[in-house]
Image (spheres, helix red, strand yellow):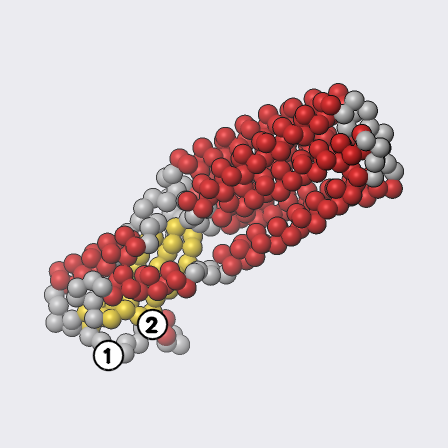
Amino acid sequence: MSGGHGHGAYDKPEATRAVLVSAIALGLAAAVEFVGGFIGHSAGVLADALHNSGDVLTTLVLLVAFAVARRPATRQFTSGFGRVEDVATLVIVIVIVVTAAAAAIESLVRLTSPATYTNVGPGLLASAAGVVANLSVSEYKVRVGRRIRSTALEADGIHSRIDALVSAAAFVGLALAAMGLPIADPIAGLLITVAIVYILAGTVGRLVLRMMDAVDPALITLITSAASGVPGVLGVHDVRARWVGRELMAVLHIDCDRTASLVEAHDVVRAVEHAVSHSVPSIKLDVHMDPGTEQHVHSADNDH
């Protein structure tokens, strides 16, 4: 016997709202930097403007991922489309890698051929606007991503945090260059490249764990404990779980009285679903009933 329970994890307007607000904020920041870069003849600010424009592209990737994730399951994708967020995270990682490579190349070129900086006021104001915009959307996206358990949204928020450092480096480098230290701009760019790679490693690590269906062992303990406390449950075993986007898919076996009627067994399953979903939100549970407490052999344990 099995039962299911879901919370409609993808029917959450917070995700779409977060990426839309971020796209608007970063688009405005990029526009300001384009104007400031052209007026101040600052290649660094122009590069940061192009970079922020790329972030708007990653935001569009998230919007597409959220739209696809809301599609109902099909005969081919029987578990739904939640894993598309992992694909979106991979795309965002690729964008960050390209960004880091571009920053490194530009910095090395400037290190060998220092530029002349004039009329830096508009460029400084524009890069400051980039810092404020990126920090604001970063905190917003990371907070919403963690609340709704979206690694893609959280990854994009971390990306915006990196971009705030890039804008800050553009500000500092431009200021020092205006003070007679033109080499400061490319050195700042190289330091930021190192920071991008360091932060990127954590995002890649989390993505790899999700792709390998890794879950926090504490979740398994929590599921087992919640199910074990339900009256009529004599034992809990073979608990398995994996993330599908923002929804946790779990399968567990419970031992019940072998003399229980079908109605009584069904009531126990419903009680287990309620107890587990109360302890672990956004979980879809599949409960299998085993008669008695002796060891049972299931089809997954056989060679057939």
Residue 246 in view of the camera = yes
Of the pair 49 and 181, the residue shown nearer to us: 181
Tell me where residue 53 appears, x and y as whole percent.
63, 32
Position of 213 with respect to 219 (left or right) is: right
Q: Badge 1 is on which residue?
A: 294
Tell me where residue 209 appears, x and y as whole percent.
51, 59
Nearer to us of marks 2 and 1 is 1
Kindly identify the residue that appears in the image at 16 percent across and 71 percent down.
Answer: 257
Kindly identify the residue that appears in the image at 70 percent across and 38 percent down.
Answer: 169
Residue 68 in view of the camera = no
Chain-order first, disc 2 or disc 1: 1
Q: Secondary structure beneath disc 1?
A: loop
Q: Which quarter shows the N terminus?
A: bottom left
Q: Which quarter shows the C terminus?
A: bottom left
Q: Secondary structure beneath disc 2?
A: helix
Q: Is residue 24 above or below residue 108?
A: above
Q: Badge 2 is on which residue?
A: 299
Amino acid on which the number 1 mark rests in the picture: Glu
Q: Residues within 10 Å of mark 2 (few under 14, many from 20)?
A: few
Disc 2 to disc 1: CB gap under 8 Å: no
